[in-house]
Image (cartoon, rainbow, N blue to C red):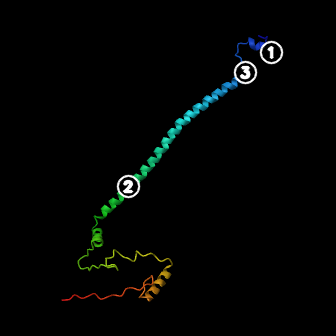
Amino acid sequence: MKPLEPRDVPQALSDAPMPAPRAQRAMTATWRLAVLVVVIAGIALVLANSLRVYFTQAQELAQERAKIAAEKDRIADLEDKLQRWNDDEYVKSIARVRLGWVMPGEVGYHVIGADGKPLEGATMNDQDEVPGTWYEKMWGSVQLADKPGEDAEGSTTPTPQPSPSPTP
């Protein structure tokens, strides 16, 4: 053992603990930091799993709420349709359209197409609208009316043929 230097003698005689050398303090701080990082990483893993479950359940909840809203809309539509059947005018209009019924004193007509089958509803609304302003459409209809023998595609309409009369 070597003798103490004069400047270290008062410190050796005092009851206060000696400070740790710098290298030992640095090593203690490094271990503390490593433990802190491990603890934070563990907490992050626990929270990450919990957050994943939370967001998955939030997405499922949103989907279920959307399904509920769609079902409520569908129920409201069905209740509206059911309520309409309590109206006599609605029932009469459906009987006229679907069954072809007419009121007493009225005459019912069925429009027969080129194929010999009755046409359903108005066929004018089924055609595509011609683009343009109203006066261009009107002028087009005037020009079309000037050519009664041709339709919109330029082909001629079939001429009516007499039906054979029954023989007695």
Which callout, 3 or 2, points to the residue nearer the camera?
3
Find numbered disc 3 in the image and state the secondary structure of the residue it sits on.
Answer: loop
Find numbered disc 2 in the image and state the secondary structure of the residue it sits on.
Answer: helix
Tell me the residue that label 3 is attached to.
21
Figure disc tally: 3
Lower position in the chain sequence, tag 1 or tag 3: 1
- For image coordinates 30% across by 72% down, the residue present is 97
Tell me which amino acid carries mark 2. Lys
Depth order, front residue of 31/18:
31
In the drawing, does residue 105 fall left or right of residue 39?
left
Tell me the residue that label 1 is attached to.
7
Q: Position of residue 100 (x, y in %)?
A: 27, 74
Q: Establish if 86 lies above or below 101.
A: above
Q: Position of residue 83 (x, y in %)?
A: 30, 62
Name the image quarter holding residue 2: top right
Find numbered disc 1 in the image and state the secondary structure of the residue it sits on.
Answer: helix
Which quarter of the rendering shows the N terminus? top right
Could you say which disc has been placed on residue 72 in the image? 2
In the drawing, does residue 7 fall left or right of residue 150?
right
Which quarter of the rendering shows the C terminus? bottom left
Q: Position of residue 23 (x, y in %)?
A: 72, 24
Lower position in the chain sequence, tag 1 or tag 2: 1
Lower position in the chain sequence, tag 3 or tag 2: 3
Q: CA distance from mark 1 to mark 3?
A: 17 Å
Name the image quarter holding residue 73: bottom left
Q: Are marks 1 and 2 in contact (CB under 8 Å)?
A: no
